[in-house]
Image: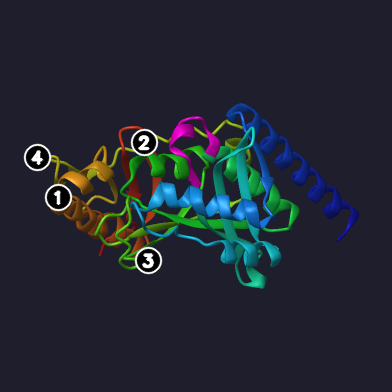
Amino acid sequence: MSMTDAAAFRASAEEAADAASAAASKAGVEIRLLTDVTDFARVAELFQSIWTKQGETSPVNVETLRALSKAGSYVGGAFEHDELVGACFGFFAAPDQRALHSHIAGVSARMRGRSVGFALKVHQRAWALQEGLDEISWTFDPLISRNAHFNLVKLAATPTSYHRNFYGHMADALNGADDTDRMLVTWYVRDPRVVAACHGDPAPASAHDGAPWLSVGEDLGPLRHATDARLVRVALPRDIESLRLAEPARATAWRLALRETLGSALEGGGRVLSFDRSGAYTIDRGEQG
C-alpha cells in the first residue's frame, strides 16, 4: 500500500468511526463487537423474541455466533446500560470480493423508532472499512415499506437483485406461511451517498414521473395496470405484516403481484431508481421489446 493509499484508508476509517460514534450517541446506546458466550446467548434470546412464536427456537444459536466471531466475522451488539437491545451479525463473502454478507439485524420492540438499527449498521460499516472491505450486502422483504425506506433511503443501499422464495418456508412470527421473496441490496461503503447517509444526511429522493404499474386497490389488495412505459411505479400496502395475520390470502396476492412487477423488472435488467414516502418504488425497466 502506498503512502497515499494508506492516508486515504486512515481517513475513511476515521470518518466511519466518527459517524458510528455519533449514531450510537444519538440512539442512546453503546455498540461493541461481541466475543463472549454469555453475550451470544443474549443475542439468541433477543432474536427469538423478535422472530419466533412462543416456544420456537431462535433463528440463530450460540454455537454459530461463537464460530462466526472466532473466524473474524462481524457480531455486534447495541446496549442501553447493561441491556442488549439490538444485534447484528454477518459473515465474509469469497476472498476476492472484499465483502461482508450481513445476515440478521434486529432491535427489541421497546427500542424501535430510536434509530438503534441505523446505529448498528453504521457501526458495521466502520468495522468493514477497518477490515479493508469494499461492500456489505444483505436481503430484506421488499413488501415491508418501512424496511424499503430504511435500506434504500436512510442507508442509501443499492438494490441489486430479486430472489423468489429465498429462504424457503419459514412460518415464523413475521413471515407467516408466505413465500420468502427477498431483495438483495449492496452497500458500497466508500460511496459518497453512503458516507452522507451514515452522517445523517441522506440524499433527497429524486422525483420521477413513473406510470402506475402496481397500486393499492379500494379493497386494499394489489391492482395491476397495463403499461408500456419505461419508468413505472410499484406501490406497497401500508402494513403487510398485519395483513398477513388478518388476511393471509390477500397478503399472498401482494407477494405474487410484487414478484410479477418488481421481481420481473429486476430479473429483466431493470433498476430501482427510488423509494418514496408514499410507499412506492420507481423502476426503470429499460428498453422494452
Closer to the eye: label 4 or 2: 4
* Magenta region: 105-116
The magenta stretch spans residue 110 = yes
Q: Are marks 3 and 4 in contact (CB under 8 Å)?
A: no
Closer to the eye: label 3 or 2: 3
Which sits earlier in the primary sequence, circle 4 or circle 2? 4
Type of amino acid under label 3: Tyr
Q: Please say whether residue 268 is visible from this viewpoint.
A: no
Q: Secondary structure at mark 4?
A: loop
Which sits earlier in the primary sequence, circle 3 or circle 2? 3
Closer to the eye: label 3 or 4: 3
- Residue visible at 29% across and 51% down in the picture: 230
On the picture, is 274 further left or further right than 278?
A: right
Which quadrant holds the C terminus?
bottom left
Q: Secondary structure at mark 2?
A: strand
Q: Residues within 10 Å of mark 2 (few under 14, many from 20)?
A: some
- Disc 2 marks which residue? 276
Q: From the top left corner, tell me how far across and down residue 216 is, in percent.
A: 17, 40
Q: Please say whether residue 266 is visible from this viewpoint.
A: yes
Q: Secondary structure at mark 1?
A: helix
- Residue visible at 21% across and 58% down in the picture: 256
Q: Are marks 4 and 1 in contact (CB under 8 Å)?
A: no
- Disc 3 marks which residue? 167
Quadrant for residue 101, please give it. Answer: bottom right
The magenta stretch spans residue 104 = no
Quadrant for residue 282, please give it. Answer: top left
- Disc 1 marks which residue? 250
Residue 96 badge = none
Q: From the top left corner, tell me how far across and down residue 180 is, in percent.
A: 32, 61
Real-space CA distance between mark 3 and mark 4, rounded to the nearest whole angstrom = 30 Å
